[in-house]
Amino acid sequence: MMVCKNCGRDNRPENITCFFCEEELVESDYSTSFNVKESFTPDFKLKLNIIAGAVVVLTLIIGTKLMCSVFANIEYAKAKDILLVKDYAQSITHLQKVVFLKPKNFDAKIFLLNSYINCGKFLEAEALALQLQKTYPDNSDVYTGVINLYLAENQSQKAIATINESYEKTKNVYFSLMSKIIVPDAPRVKLEEGDYDKIQKVEIRGGNNSIYYTLDGTPPTTNSTKYETPFDLPEGKSVLTVVAVNDKGVSSVPASYTYNIDIPLVVAEFSDSEFERLVREYLKMLTGTIYEKDLLKIKSLAIVGDKIIPEGLSGVTAYNENSYVNEEGKTIAVPVKGKIQSLDDLRKFGGLTELSICYQESLNIPALKELSKLTKVYLVNDNFTDSASTSLTALTDLLELDIRFNPNENINAYSFSSMNRLEKLMVSNVKFSDLTSLDSLPNLKTLYLLNGNLSNLNGIEDLKKLKELNVAGNNIADYSKAQAIAGLKILK
């Protein structure tokens, strides 16, 4: 190309005059022509290569995004079709691909969260819910998913808290969410609030729900004391607070009841001097006045012969005919029998749950039937002077009963028929011939029937929980039925 010096325009090399101004072109005009080859310097080439590469990369990125979008849409369509038939496990596979290919697809993430929940994949659901809450803090669908997750995990308290905290975000679906949570009614306490001058028993009713309570006014949780059976309120002021928790883990509104128990100072009078001596030794009050309220605090009482066991029943691990084994495993002989004759004074021990009075010369026990809280009774080698059967049948909450080495003329299988919680029964001189009449004791784990009239083990198959059997001193020839019970320890 040639550049006209007159007008500055480019002309073909073969032109003699300028095509535009018709001025003559001279040889010197070639020096100003553009040399394409000479213009491609290394820097210029580098720039061209960079531009070309950028164009290629941009093309690839756009193409890849388009391909990802196409594949994501295909997987998303498959997932929605599968969700229509509620195949959540299969939908997870497709939705995971959608989220990977198209990370900003919010709807796919919500569908994936719900699929995780419906498949019980709570760890994955929690991780995704946390991510969604951070990314979309004001989205009602996210909070709805989180609430559904809590409900699926039976964390109803968290669900309720989240519903209330996010009300502004979820108010359009508030009632729909709350309808999924059935809040149970508060339990009912069958004792009027007020002041009392003696220990009061509390019974709580809450339908089929579990009941938890505290006595200091703090709201109960599932870690608080669980109500099983009626219990005594302690002396002093108590603020009984109760909640009911249904099978979904939803708790009722707490209900509180205030009581004040002020027991007057009544002097405890004893009719059996030997029993009084042992009780004073237990209380470490050899002299001075004992009040009935002091006796109400005693929960476990153990007397062997003429001695008191300071630790209560926990201080004795086993009883033999004329000896016992202490908590250290040492066998201690009982050389002298005790002189306690009557248990009438036990009527003042209203809080007693464990009682062991063993190795007495003779013992009158009618007062036992008034101690309804007893769960463990050991009356070994006491030579009962009255009908033990009548006194024992009233103890329906017993878990352990040992009345070995007593005459027991009036003891028969029906003496224990009301003790359906009994887990340990040890009797000697039994008058029944087989075990069929013990079918009312389904919780028995330990059974000792010594020196009696047993001739067979018929009925043992009904004692499903039995782990230890001792029938020494009976005329039993066939032990096959007992041997057929897996894991049963048989002592002969």
Image (tube, grey):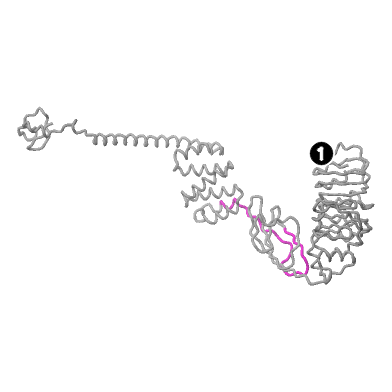
Is 276 or 70 nearer to us in this picture?
Answer: 276
Q: Is residue 61 magenta?
A: no
Measuring from the top left, give residue 165's x and y in whole percent: 53, 56
Measuring from the top left, give residue 402's x and y in whole percent: 86, 52
The structure residue drawn at horizontal position 53% and vertical position 52%, both measured from the top left corner, is: 173
**Number of marks drawn:** 1
* Residue 181 visible in image: yes
On the rendered structure, is 97 left or right of 244? left
Residue bearing the label numbered 1: 485
Measuring from the top left, give residue 201's x and y in whole percent: 76, 62
Magenta residues? 176-204
Q: Main secondary structure of the magenta part?
A: loop
The structure residue drawn at horizontal position 77% and vertical position 64%, both measured from the top left corner, is: 200
Which residue extends farthest left?
A: 24
On the rendered structure, is 19 left or right of 84? left
Residue density around tag 1, few if under 14, some if 14–19, many if 20 or more, within 10 Å: some
Is 179 or 93 nearer to us in this picture?
Answer: 93
50 over 186 or under it: above or below: above
Which quarter shows the N terminus?
top left
